[in-house]
Each structure stands twice: as structure tokens, then as C-alpha cells.
Image (spheres, rainbow, N blue to C red):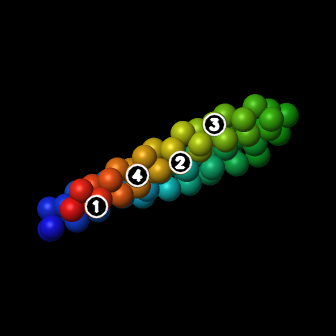
Amino acid sequence: MGLIALGAAIAVLTGAGAGIGIGIATAKATESIARQPEAKGDIRTALLLGCALAEATAIYGFVIAIMIIGKA
């Protein structure tokens, strides 16, 4: 049971990486909008697409963790 819990914990760590990535992307997008306000629409579109992909990675890690725990 210990190794299963360890594997699930490692799988859930993808959420931390996604959170850090989304935070950095949001900071850079805000900085870009401040420097070039006329490109706000394009920057927002790219930001939302990138955040969605990062969040999907975190959800995949969570699903894998649930599957690993389900095998126990």
C-alpha cells in the first residue's frame, strides 16, 4: 500500500507544476498587455489556450492518481 500511495502522490504533483506554469504565464501576459495594449486580444487568446493546456495536464495527473489508488 505504501508504494501505491507514493505513486499517487507523485502523479498529483503535476498540479503543482501546472499552477506554477499558469502563474508565470499570467504574469507575462499582464506584462505584455501593459507594454502593448493594442495586442490585448491576441495575448488573451494565447494565454487562455496555454492555461487550458496546463490545466489539462494537472487533470490527467489527478485521474492517474485516482486510477492508481483504485488498483489497491
What is the count of numbered marks?
4
47 to 14, vertically: above or below: above
Real-space Cα separation, disc 2 to disc 3, in angstroms: 10 Å
Q: Position of residue 14 (x, y in %)?
A: 38, 52
- Residue 44 in view, yes or no: yes
Tell me if label 4 and label 2 are in contact, CB under 8 Å. Answer: no
Res. 55 mark: 2
Mark 2: few, some, or many residues within 10 Å (few <14, many ≥20)? some
Q: Which residue is mark 1?
A: 69
Real-space Cα separation, disc 4 to disc 2, in angstroms: 12 Å
Asked if residue 67 lies left or right of residue 38, the reply is left
Real-space Cα separation, disc 2 to disc 1, in angstroms: 21 Å
Instruction: Please identify, in this view, whether the residue under mark 4 or under mark 3 is nearer the observer.
Output: 4
Q: Which residue is mark 3?
A: 49
- In terms of sequence position, does the residue under pointer 1 or pointer 3 come before the other? 3
Q: Position of residue 43 (x, y in %)?
A: 72, 36
Tell me if label 4 and label 1 are in contact, CB under 8 Å. Answer: no
Q: Dot 3: what SS? A: helix
**What residue do we see at 59% from left, 44% from top?**
51
What kind of residue is marked 3? Leu
Tell me if label 2 and label 3 are in contact, CB under 8 Å. Answer: no
